[in-house]
Amino acid sequence: MAKQEIKNSALNNIRLVWELFQLNLKIIFANKFFLFLLAAFLFFIFVTLIILFGSDANPTDESVYYLLLFPGILLIAYPTIFGIQNDADSRTLEVLFGIPNYRYKVWLVRFVFIYIIVFMLMFVLGALSYVAITYFSIFKMTYQLMFPIFFLGSVAFMFSTVIRNGYGTAVVMVVIGLFFWVMSEGLVESKWNLFLNPFHVPANVSEIVWADIMMKNRIYLVVGTVLSLLWGLLNLQKREKFVS
């Protein structure tokens, strides 16, 4: 009898997780997400063709990293920038704010799904790059790309809880992205460079020093990701600002 109860409980938990997964997929993939997905793949195909048929084409894993970075940012942009607005427009926020520990039971789970989906899509793009462009470690490439992509996703979520408008948040994120991109030219070998390329080892820097720079850069991005996510979750506790 006890075994049957345990089995039933396990099946109920699995069913609950599956239903939660389906619900979040519908939310994440709602509205304009497929436009962002299409834009990411079109950009990937366009740049890949340029690399393959360019007169000076000599593709390396370093160039593949930059090729995949922009599609990754596009993929994580929509669910993190427009997630709050979509919930508000569909009146979902009013329901979610009635759930105890809302921030932990809903948005954290949603973020896990978003990160998993983006990782899987980037792995697919990495595999296509491996076949079409040059040989490299697909898992390592995808793993390294997740640091700046997840950081920008968390920052976008944080600003979306402050601005509470998807288009306004998008404008802010474009400005932030351009700022970091312009700054990266002067910080190309710095631990503060958001777009630091782990596959580009400077000739004038020893491997030990470079490994230390990369480790610090990734730690800073992880810390920034966590802090931005927590800040956004704390902002969601101000119910009156989101539910009129």
Image: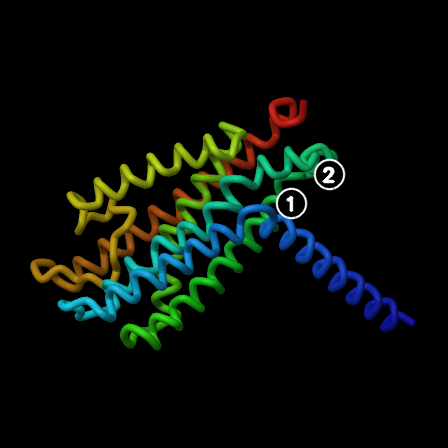
Q: Is residue 214 left or right of residue 81?
A: left
Secondary structure beneath dot 1 equals helix
In the foreground, 117 or 217: 117
Task: Please state, as top left, top right, bottom left or bottom right, where the C terminus lies in the image.
Answer: top right
Give the residue at x 36% y 38%.
174
Tell me how far mark 1 sits from mark 2, CA to CA.
9 Å
Q: Please identify the residue farthest to the right as the structure is shown.
A: 1
Amino acid carrying label 1: it is Val
In the foreground, 145 or 127: 127
Q: Please identify the residue farthest to the left as the structure is shown.
A: 204
Q: Do the numbered discs 1 and 2 sit on residues whose CB atoms are within 8 Å?
A: yes
Residue 220 vertical position relative to residue 67 in the rendered view, above or below: above
Give the residue at x 35% y 77%.
131
How many neighbours does mark 1 have within 10 angstroms: few (below 14), some (14-19), or many (20 or more)? some
Residue 217 vertical position relative to residue 203 in the rendered view, above or below: above
Q: Position of residue 43 (x, y in %)?
A: 36, 57
Amino acid carrying label 2: it is Ile
Secondary structure beneath dot 2 equals loop
Task: Please state, as top left, top right, bottom left or bottom right, where the N terminus lies in the image.
Answer: bottom right
How many neighbours does mark 2 have within 10 angstroms: few (below 14), some (14-19), or many (20 or more)? few
Coloring applied to the structure: rainbow
Residue 104 vertical position relative to residue 132 in the rendered view, above or below: above
Q: Position of residue 41 (x, y in %)?
A: 42, 60
- Could you say which quadrant of the image residue 55 lies in? bottom left
Report which residue position mark 1 lands on: 106
Give the residue at x 32% y 61%.
46
Report which residue position mark 2 lands on: 99
Q: Position of residue 104 (x, y in %)?
A: 62, 43
Give the residue at x 36% y 50%.
148
